[in-house]
Image (cartoon, rainbow, N blue to C red):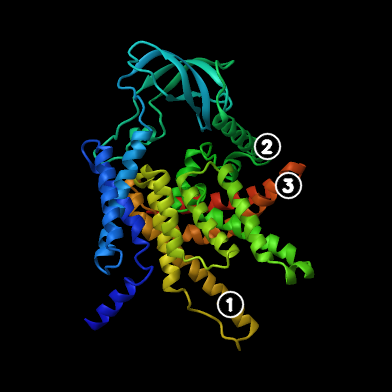
């Protein structure tokens, strides 16, 4: 009992309960989604404010303060998602509508394997059985016919209500589209015409058009140099456009347990930040004057922060990308401020920020699997991977052999930790598990880290000067190895 009391004192010491705040905040969000009816905004906000005042009042109490703080975080999560739902409230189609005429601005465009898909911000819409005016609709269009982002178009379409879950407890596509302010889905009938807009699209649309133009330009450069699935995956790693990957390769990647490579997340951000940081610091260190008299480490961190900010925008800024960007940014800012980044606190700050900005992400598999994997890796590192360290007096060959053994063991343990953490979520959402993930990660990830991503970053730098094509091809060669590994592991007995 004495030992248990000592452990409890350590685990509830200053700063140790901070990582539980986002867990409590997320619990409040899940309570909202579990409710049968929409909660009243005034009720949830009043509860959150009341608990916040009570928490402040007992801030000196060693027991009451953390208890009320946790309850306040739960209430704050519920209030946040309630206000978010109120903010995005919009009409939703309730029955299938045929022969709908609509005009609007193209906000997003996705290139897919068989068809393209666009989201239109509606300026006018009419048709039988429509019932009400919609703000946004998502349309499937023929391959290679999707207009550019920012275009004002007119089209004929058949629209349907967003899909409800196919089974009790299944993934709710309608909920996802609701928070994206999309009120109907369907497909275009006939040609889509680009027209002169009746009014300007606004600053946000111009920014979206500019970003999409940059992404499309890089995507075209990659595909002009690298064919097939290798080009599609290269584009996914750089621009976040992963919808053109063939179903065979896409399934093989996830069955093999390396599908996480296709979603730009912490791994990619860490590689980008690390490569830029060490490259800039190494170049600045070539000057004795700068190396001895200027804080080149902080300068390198600042450049790396700019680089990952550009990468965030370029990649489409999905939930996993936002989380990894926030974590990496906190670490880099810590370097610039001469502060050590506390990893669990970094994860907690990233989680809270994402949930405040997009509380609906809590029920999305991307959020759950991304944070579960990162938490497992941080916990594993804090527990310590300190075995197999070569001694100081060991021979050069022994040190090299032990270093290689330790790196392989670290990769195996990291793969097992991340795989074990994400497997329950994969089983729940996708009804499958990947038992051979360690094999695929061991064979593919070193190549992705040391070959694929560095060549991709160099190609981005060389693209404005027109020397990027050979670098994209070198990147594609590494991706071909990753695809071969994925197909081989996916073909093993019991791979899924």
Check if mark 3's residue and mark 2's residue have beta carbons within 8 Å: no
* Between discs 2 and 1, the one toward the N terminus: 2
Which residue has dot 2 on it?
Answer: 224
Q: Is residue 49 visible?
A: yes
Image location of residue 277, percent across then percent down: 64, 60
Q: CA distance from mark 3 to mark 2?
A: 15 Å
In-front residue for pair 66/379: 66
Please, is residue 132 above or below residue 66 in the view?
above
Image location of residue 135, percent across then percent down: 42, 24
For this view, does 398 lie left or right of residue 246?
A: right
In-front residue for pair 190/52: 52
In-front residue for pair 371/432: 371
Secondary structure at numbered mark 1? helix
Q: CA distance from mark 2 to mark 1?
A: 42 Å
Front position among marks 1 and 3: 3
Q: Is residue 471 visible?
A: no
* Between discs 1 and 3, the one toward the N terminus: 1
Which residue has dot 3 on it?
Answer: 462
For this view, does 55 lie left or right of residue 386?
A: left
Taking the spot 51% from the left edge, 43% from the top edge, the residue there is 317
For this view, does 25 lie left or right of residue 467?
A: left
Task: Count residues near mark 1 (Cα–Cα under 10 Å), then give few for <14, some for 14-19, many for 20+.
Answer: few
Image location of residue 51, percent across then percent down: 26, 53
Check if mark 2's residue and mark 1's residue have beta carbons within 8 Å: no
Please, is residue 234 above or below residue 449 in the view?
above
Taking the spot 34% from the left edge, 39% from the top edge, the residue there is 83
Which residue has dot 1 on it?
Answer: 401
Q: Can you tell which quarter of the image residue 144 is in?
A: top right
Image location of residue 39, percent across then percent down: 24, 38
């Amino acid at each position: 009992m004495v030992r248990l009391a000592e452990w409890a004192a350590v685990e509830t010491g200053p700063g140790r309960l901070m990582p539980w705040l986002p867990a409590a905040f997320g619990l409040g969000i899940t309570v909202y989604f579990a409710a049968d009816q929409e909660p009243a905004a005034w009720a949830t906000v009043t509860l959150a404010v009341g608990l916040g005042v009570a928490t402040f009042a007992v801030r000196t109490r060693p027991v009451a303060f953390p208890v009320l703080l946790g309850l306040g975080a739960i209430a704050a999560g519920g209030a946040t998602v309630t206000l978010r739902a109120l903010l995005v409230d919009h009409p939703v189609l309730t029955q299938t509508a045929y022969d709908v005429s609509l005009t609007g601005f193209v906000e997003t465009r996705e290139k897919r394997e068989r068809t393209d898909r666009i989201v239109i911000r509606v300026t006018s819409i009419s048709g039988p059985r429509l019932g009400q005016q919609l703000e946004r609709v998502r349309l499937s269009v023929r391959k290679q016919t999707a207009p550019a982002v920012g275009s004002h178009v007119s089209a004929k379409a058949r629209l349907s209500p967003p899909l409800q879950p196919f089974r009790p407890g299944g993934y709710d596509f309608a909920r996802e589209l609701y928070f994206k302010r999309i009120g109907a889905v369907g497909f275009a009938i006939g040609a889509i015409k680009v027209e002169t807009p009746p009014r300007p699209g606004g600053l946000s649309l111009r920014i979206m058009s500019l970003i999409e133009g940059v992404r499309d330009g890089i995507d075209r450069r990659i595909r002009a140099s690298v064919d097939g699935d290798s080009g599609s995956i290269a584009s996914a790693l750089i621009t976040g456009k992963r919808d053109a990957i063939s179903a065979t390769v896409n399934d093989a990647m996830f069955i093999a347990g390396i599908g996480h490579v296709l979603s730009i997340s912490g791994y990619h951000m860490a590689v980008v930040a690390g490569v830029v940081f060490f490259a800039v610091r190494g170049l600045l260190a070539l000057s004795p004057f700068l190396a001895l008299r200027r804080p080149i480490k902080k300068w390198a961190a600042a450049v790396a922060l700019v680089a990952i900010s550009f990468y965030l925008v370029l990649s489409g800024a999905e939930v996993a990308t936002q989380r990894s960007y926030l974590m990496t940014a906190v670490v880099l800012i810590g370097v610039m401020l001469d502060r050590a980044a506390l990893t669990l606190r970094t994860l907690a700050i990233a989680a809270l920020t994402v949930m405040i900005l997009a509380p609906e992400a809590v029920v999305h598999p991307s959020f759950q699997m991304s944070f579960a994997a990162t938490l497992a890796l941080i916990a594993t590192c804090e527990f310590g991977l300190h075995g197999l360290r070569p001694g100081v007096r060991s021979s050069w060959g022994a040190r090299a052999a032990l270093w290689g053994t330790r790196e392989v063991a670290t990769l195996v343990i990291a793969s097992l930790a991340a795989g074990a953490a994400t497997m329950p979520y994969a089983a729940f959402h996708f009804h499958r598990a990947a038992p051979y993930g360690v094999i695929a990660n061991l064979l593919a990830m070193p190549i992705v880290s040391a070959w694929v991503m560095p060549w991709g970053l160099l190609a981005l730098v060389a693209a404005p000067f027109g020397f990027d094509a050979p670098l994209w091809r070198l990147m594609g060669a590494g991706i071909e190895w990753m695809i071969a590994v994925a197909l081989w592991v996916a073909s093993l007995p019991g791979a899924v």
